[in-house]
Image (cartoon, rainbow, N blue to C red):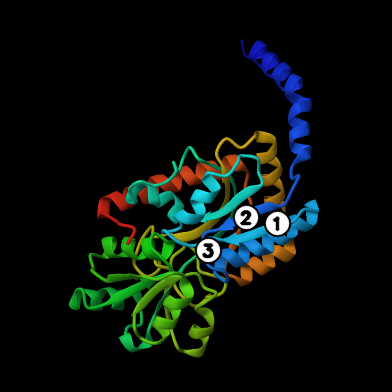
Amino acid sequence: MRISNALALAAAVFASGPALAGESQAFPSRPIRWIVPLPPGATADIITRFVAQKVSESWGQQIVVDNRPGGVFTVGSEIVAKAPADGHTVGTLLTPHVVNPFVTKNLPYNTERDFTPVTLMVIVPGVMTMYPGVGATTLKDVIALAKAKPEALNYGSPGPLTSGHLSMELLKLRAGINITHIPYKGGAPAIIDLVGGRIQFLISGPPGVLPHIKAGRLKAIATTASKRSPGLPDTPTFIESGMPGFDTYEWYGVFAPGKLPKPVLAKLSQEIARVIKLPEISERLAVQGALPVGNTAEEFASFVKSEMDLWGKLAQKIGLKAD
């Protein structure tokens, strides 16, 4: 039975081979539009432009990076979801993409049906930073202070449902503390307010806060991933700071519209993954505090499902909202 099935499958693939090959070879036949649901200058935007430039050079085809922020990342996501499924529109989507269906009513798309995962570009571990005037030194100090002054402290995030938001909500749940969330439209304005003492805490990617940490304007408390950040070797992890199993990060992945033809998906996935793994690109990504991945479409699809299971359950458990 297995042999006959295999032969039938081989015959089908052989019969469709020329058409599939032709479809793949014809792509890309015109400029590619690459949506980023964040303002220019955001870490995801910077990383996308690094990768897009190299892919453009390799294929000899223009790639236009189109920033479409708004709607808790849904404005840009909707453009990707509703574009023709021919590979000429893709988007860099991040962690909120898998949380939105659990917390946002009437999404203009179906998160699972209307997108094709292409490849996971990078993972960006977060760092919890603090305004020095708060007077804490360790994560245990922060938790003790929050318990002593319930609802007196606040924290900023680069935006609702980002890893910075989710990580702090997970900390609040695990530690039994209450710290008020103040969402921002990107990491830059949140960092400005943190340095100015208008908020007390922030979990974000390292690039924007590293200069302030080195200058003493901010204090690094702990990093969110299971291993210490190469850029902050002296900063302990949440696990080392008394939070067993705490391992969170932001991720940036490439998605295309749903029902993307397999030959086009393979070409997109393989080329973007190849570029991400180039030494010159890997080094530029590391400067941004990002860990390059570049996996297969199948591996990324499995990752997306696991992330939906993880953060969807948390969102439901604590009644998270896209505020």
Q: Eyeballing the image, is 314 above or below 262?
A: below
User: What is the crowding at mark 2: few (fewer than 14 residues within 10 Å), some, or many (at least 20)?
Assistant: many
Instruction: From the top left corner, tell me how far across and down residue 321 is, in percent.
Output: 30, 57
Instruction: From the top left corner, tell me how far across and down residue 239 is, in percent.
Output: 39, 64
Instruction: State which tag comes first along the sequence, 2 or 1.
Output: 2
State the mark number for residue 34. Answer: 2
Measured in 3D between alpha carbons, the distance from the residue under mark 3 to the one under mark 2, in whole angstroms, is 20 Å
Instruction: From the top left corner, tell me how far across and down residue 110 is, in percent.
Output: 44, 41
Q: Eyeballing the image, is 84 above or below 47?
A: above
Measured in 3D between alpha carbons, the distance from the residue under mark 2 to the one under mark 1, in whole angstroms, is 7 Å
Nearest the eye: 120 or 245: 120
**Numbered disc 3: secondary structure:** strand
User: The N terminus lies in which quarter of the figure?
Assistant: top right
Instruction: Kindly indicate the quadrant of the structure image that contains residue 147.
Output: bottom left
* Image-based side of 37 in relation to 200, left or right: right
Instruction: State which tag comes first along the sequence, 1 or 3.
Output: 1
User: The C terminus lies in which quarter of the figure?
Assistant: bottom left
Question: Closer to the camera: disc 3 or disc 2?
Answer: 2
**Numbered disc 2: secondary structure:** strand
Q: Residue at x 38, y 57 (%)?
A: 245
Q: Which residue is drawn at 43% across and 62% down?
A: 163
What's the amino acid at mark 2? Trp
Instruction: From the top left corner, tell me how far across and down residue 276 is, in percent.
Output: 68, 57
What's the amino acid at mark 1? Ile
Number of disc labels: 3
Q: For residue 127, say whether it is visible.
A: no
Nearest the eye: 130 or 48: 48
Q: Name the residue under label 1.
A: 63
Q: Name the residue under label 3.
A: 124
Instruction: State which tag comes first along the sequence, 3 or 2.
Output: 2
